[in-house]
Amino acid sequence: MLTQGTPSARGKFVFQNPSSESEQKNPEGVIHGGHTTEILRLLGSLSNAYSPRHYVIADTDEMSANKINSFELDRADRDPSNMYTKYYIHRIPRSREVRQSWPSTVFTTLHSMWLSFPLIHQVKPDLVLCNGPGTCVPICVSALLLGILGIKKVIIVYVESVCRVETLSLSGKILFHLSDYFIVQWPALKEKYPKSVYLGRIV
């Protein structure tokens, strides 16, 4: 599914998940469950080689935490070899609250980034997989900084939400220029952004 840029070797992976508030109030959230459901569908296709898994969610987001725990438990039930696969849930402050003013978003994003970099530096993932929410920007920028500082090259894979048919999300517009692989799920976006990777519907 992510053969366009996923390392074949074992390694640490960070999967960024959104806040439950953004899922509930996103006007384009036509997929039940929002971004968290989409990212977990992607992870369902990954083998046990992608371990340990590190999930990053907003600090007040209990809905995504519950979904992740249920996903991992179900994964272990279906395949006994998954029982001892490690996963971790990390929390960072939201980059932007619902209806927060755009000028103040600059400061909350910087605060989120300030706390994201130590986490990414500690985990030193091989790959960051994210799919749309604003909290993924600090994570991806932090991963990019690891490479700039010569600590470790981290592959960033951004999967635009299936809800985005003709235009990119704000996170997508930012990370289109920062990610190693930018995956879209509609041909109209591929036409507008030729450097993107179109694999059809993957969630």
Image: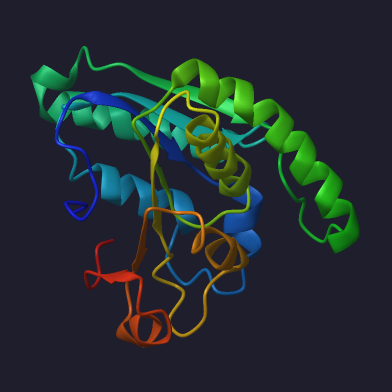
Depth check: give the residue in front, 77 or 101: 101
Depth check: give the residue in front, 119 or 18: 119
Horizontal side of 141 relative to 195 (left or right) equals right
Task: Name which quarter of the figure residue 75 lies in.
Answer: top left
Instruction: Confirm whether residue 93 shows in the render.
Output: no
Instruction: Confirm whether residue 180 shows in the render.
Output: yes
Depth check: give the residue in front, 32 or 186: 186
Total numbered badges shown on the rendered structure:
0
How is the protein colored in the picture? rainbow
Q: Residue at x 53, y 64 (%)?
A: 172
Task: Name which quarter of the figure residue 158 lies in.
Answer: bottom left
Q: Residue at x 48, y 24 (%)?
A: 89
**Residue 47's x, y, as percent?**
14, 34
Depth check: give the residue in front, 13 or 153: 153
**Residue 69's x, y, as percent?**
39, 28
**Residue 90's x, y, as percent?**
54, 24
Q: Is residue 105 above or below residue 67?
A: below
The extreme top residue here reads 84
Horizontal side of 92 relative to 144 (left or right) equals right
Name the image quarter holding the N terminus.
bottom left
Name the image quarter holding the C terminus.
bottom left
Q: Residue at x 23, y 44 (%)?
A: 6
Q: Is residue 107 above or below residue 24?
A: above
Q: Residue at x 69, y 27 (%)?
A: 115
Horizontal side of 156 relative to 97 (left or right) equals left
Horizontal side of 103 relative to 182 (left or right) equals right
